[in-house]
Image (spheres, rainbow, N blue to C red):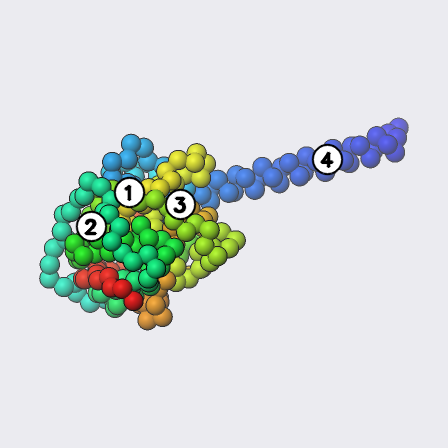
């Protein structure tokens, strides 16, 4: 006969095993989630040797991006294209050897205005918190780097962002240099959530290996709905109220199925930045 003490120990072991099983399942779900997000938003960096496919928003160049592990299907929509025809003009093919010297006023705020085919998206940028990021955009925009470029990726499941800033329109382009991560302890990023209206940098950071820090380029994403993301992506701007209405219009039109080569889920709306400007507020 099993004694009371033996029975107590047996129940304790069973409880411990159940706890271990739940922890294992939770870790597995977390790994799958990271892989899914990575494949949706993976982009590669200029001059990078390896592609990191296990984490979220990867940044700029090279076709190795096709090695992303999982591709969740986007939600195709039959909504008509709500945007206008792009203005005449071509994307400039510009590459720079190094990050530009700081010229912005670190005590000031700047506004980047994206004049898109879907409407104007104003972005307020804080040079005090993200001086090198703001300086980089000030430099690139004044060179016409973003003019006539497409916003190449829209995600409408899990996380809710529109990704832009790649002259190639594939998720593989960049300016030729990288900038460091900034402002990762911003108070807005509580609970690993990027709130609606946040504008942040894509990069190559891999949370599992710790590699890919300080790898921002020119690609950035605009959050149109609160999105669960670890605080690994420089939050450098906030979308204006009018800009949020434009983002909603783009999001409502839905996204296309993932491209088998680039893993992009392109917006159904034709989102082209006709002209970008930066000015001191």
Residue at the spot of label 3: 56
Real-space Cα separation, disc 2 to disc 1, in angstroms: 16 Å
Q: Nearer the viewer, mark 2 or mark 1?
A: 1
Q: Quadrant of the C terminus?
A: bottom left
Q: Earlier in the sequence, mark 1 or mark 3?
A: 3
Asked if marks 4 and 3 touch (Cβ < 8 Å), the reply is: no
Q: Quadrant of the N terminus?
A: top right
Coordinates of residue 151 in the picture (x, y in percent):
26, 55
Q: Earlier in the sequence, mark 2 or mark 3?
A: 3
Quadrant assignment, res 39:
top left
* Crowdedness near tag 1: few (<14), some (14–19) or many (≥20) residues, C-alpha within 10 Å: many
Real-space Cα separation, disc 1 to disc 4, in angstroms: 52 Å
Question: Residue at horizontal 28%, vertical 42%?
Answer: 178
Question: Residue at horizontal 66%, vertical 39%?
Answer: 19
Real-space Cα separation, disc 2 to disc 3, in angstroms: 21 Å
Q: Secondary structure at mark 4?
A: helix
**Is 267 or 247 nearer to us in this picture?**
247
Residue 270 left/right relative to 2: left
Q: Is residue 183 visible?
A: yes
Q: Is residue 43 above or below residue 77?
A: above
Q: Earlier in the sequence, mark 1 or mark 4?
A: 4
Q: Secondary structure at mark 1?
A: loop
Q: Nearer the viewer, mark 4 or mark 3?
A: 3
Residue at the spot of label 1: 178
Q: Nearer the viewer, mark 4 or mark 2?
A: 2
Q: Is residue 31 above or below residue 107?
A: above
* Crowdedness near tag 3: few (<14), some (14–19) or many (≥20) residues, C-alpha within 10 Å: many
Coordinates of residue 79 in the picture (x, y in percent):
30, 65
Residue at the spot of label 2: 167
Residue 20 left/right relative to 230: right
Q: Which mark is residue 14?
A: 4
């Amino acid at each position: 006969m099993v004694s009371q003490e033996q029975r107590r120990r047996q129940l304790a072991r069973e409880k411990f095993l159940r706890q271990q099983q739940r922890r294992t399942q939770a870790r597995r779900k977390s790994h799958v989630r990271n892989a899914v997000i990575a494949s949706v938003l993976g982009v590669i960096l200029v001059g990078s040797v390896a592609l990191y496919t296990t984490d979220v928003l990867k940044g700029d160049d090279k076709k190795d991006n096709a090695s992303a592990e999982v591709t969740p299907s986007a939600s195709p929509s039959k909504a008509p294209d709500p945007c206008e025809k792009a203005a005449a003009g071509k994307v400039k093919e510009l590459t720079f050897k190094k990050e530009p010297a700081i010229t912005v006023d670190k005590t000031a705020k700047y506004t980047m205005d994206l004049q898109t085919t879907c409407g104007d998206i104003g972005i307020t940028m804080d040079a005090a918190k993200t001086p090198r990021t703001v300086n980089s955009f000030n430099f690139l925009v004044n060179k016409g780097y973003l003019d006539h470029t497409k916003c190449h990726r829209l995600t409408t499941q899990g996380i809710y962002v529109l990704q832009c800033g790649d002259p190639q329109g594939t998720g593989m382009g960049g300016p030729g240099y990288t900038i460091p991560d900034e402002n990762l302890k911003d108070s807005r990023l509580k609970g690993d959530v990027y709130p609606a209206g946040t504008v942040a940098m894509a990069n190559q950071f891999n949370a599992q290996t710790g590699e890919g820090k300080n790898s921002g380029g020119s690609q950035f994403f605009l959050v149109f709905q609160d999105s669960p993301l670890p605080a690994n992506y420089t939050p450098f701007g906030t979308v204006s109220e009018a800009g949020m209405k434009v983002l909603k219009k783009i999001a409502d039109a839905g996204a296309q199925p993932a491209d088998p080569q680039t893993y992009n889920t392109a917006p159904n709306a034709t989102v082209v930045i006709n002209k970008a400007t930066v000015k001191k507020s």
